[in-house]
Amino acid sequence: MGRHKNPRYNRKRLVVAGTAAVTVFGAMVGIGIYGSAMADQNQRRAADSSQACLPPPPTASAPPSSTTTAPPSSETAPPETAPPEDTGTETATDTPTATETATETATETETDTATESAPPADTATSESEEPVGFSSGRLVSMNGPGRGNQPEPPDYGGPQPSEQAPEAPADGTMRKFGGDNCQDPLGPFPRDFVDIRKVRPSNLNAQPRVRRGGSAGTFTVDCGRNENGHLNSANMIAAPGNVNGAQHTHDYVGNLTTDGFSSNESLAAGGTTCTNGDKSAYFWPVIRVRNAGSTAVDPLNAHNVGDPILPASVQIQFRGNPTQKVTPAPQFLRILTGDAKSSTNGGANANAKWTCTRFENRITTKYPLCPRGSQTVRIADFPGCNDGNTDSANHRTHLAFADRRGNCPEGFQPIPQLRITLKYNLPRGKVFALDAFPDEKHNPLTDHNDFVNVMGEELMNQVVDCINRGRRC
């Protein structure tokens, strides 16, 4: 700015310029504040949209059960304004809409009559015929097929899970799931969710009768809930030597060193979260909640978005065989169950089982919507027969499921059969989904679980002895 010969004029120009600068600065600050307020408003709208993408969650209190221990009060009655503390994440406020509140008020005194022992026939309603192969009286267990005569999906070389959960009946309510605003191209989709009370009873926990010479015991391992935050998107079994072989994040318990580059030697030298010294690796895909404004995105896989939820409880249990004594599983045995790509490969090897606490007699392959006070449950049953090898080319053919009577195929021996049960406190009214490969669109059918046996000989012998003696250890 050129200077004028008159000093008084120069001073006046400086005053005017200063005033203009202050005005511009103030306007910028105002715009910033206004923009921030608009962003907050958009996030609130997104949160409302997330709630609109699910029908009002079931509101009837879960019935008491003689076979399932009720979780602590802090888990059975989570507050509506915030998720439970043990979900392991900070999630957005879960405030019910006016419609949801009215629905809950109107149904507060309803009594849900679904029990594990005697579910009434009219509890589950459907607008379509019963799916082929489904029967509430048919055995759906660790060793029973429960498939009827429906054609099997194409098998690409692995053992076919013998206890595939039945599909949930069609539900007209789910077709009204949020309209076009909820058709997120990433998934999940309306068809992927079901009210657990719409699912007909199945008999998951009914085991074949243990005959003379069988093994009826169980051995439970406490390895925590991944409180130490052991997470990565590798898979040392299916994609060894790859830092992002899974393209989705896994929760790990047990061995502290598990990653894409783990070897037998590194696992044997690692520490563990298991209280009995078990150095085995147990891992599964995380569940995320789609909270507005969440910055918790998988850094290597942008399709996996939302806040990861820590399980409220993890049960790792080894079981016996109804016809034979179990034999020790070989050290460094690799086992997986389910299929991370089941929705795009025709369903071969799929073995997803979802339910809710107090409704464990209702199993579905969809994401269950649970009533207030009921936890979301994932059940992973592993093959219980082994041919003596620790791995195979496709990581499946060295294993097999027993038939519905409990018999292993020729050339296979029964080993302690692993079942992992995961329970979650999920904020009601929010969309949740598994981490998955991008092409799978977060389909709940893709749930899967992995295990590498790193038990020492002494510990494995304890497991076998406990199960074969019919004890509960």
Image (cartoon, rainbow, N blue to C red):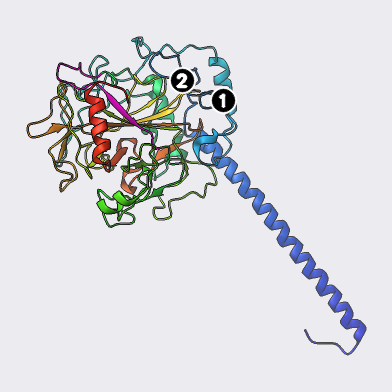
Residue sitting at 13 percent across and 32 percent down? 413
Residue 194 found in image quarter: top left
Q: Is residue 263 visible?
A: no
Residue 457 image offset from top left, x and y in percent: 23, 40
Q: Is residue 220 magenta?
A: yes
Of the pair 274 and 200, the residue shown nearer to us = 274
Q: Is residue 398 left or right of residue 62?
A: left
What amino acid type is highlighted by mark number 1? Thr
Q: Is residue 225 magenta?
A: no
Q: Secondary structure at mark 1?
A: helix
Percent coordinates x, y for residue 100 in the rendering: 55, 25
Which disc, if any, is residue 70?
2
**Depth check: 176 or 109 in front?**
109
Q: Name the residue beneath numbered marker 1.
A: 99
- Given residues 223 and 337, the one toward you in this image is 223
Q: State the residue at coordinates (14%, 19%).
A: 213
**Residue span colored magenta:** 207-223
Specify few, some or many for label 1: CA neighbours under 10 Å numbering under 14, 14-19, or 20 or more: few
Q: Position of residue 399 (x, y in %)?
A: 16, 37
In three-dimensional space, the C-alpha distance between marks 2 and 1, rounded to whole angstroms, equals 29 Å
Q: For the N terminus, give its image quadrant.
A: bottom right
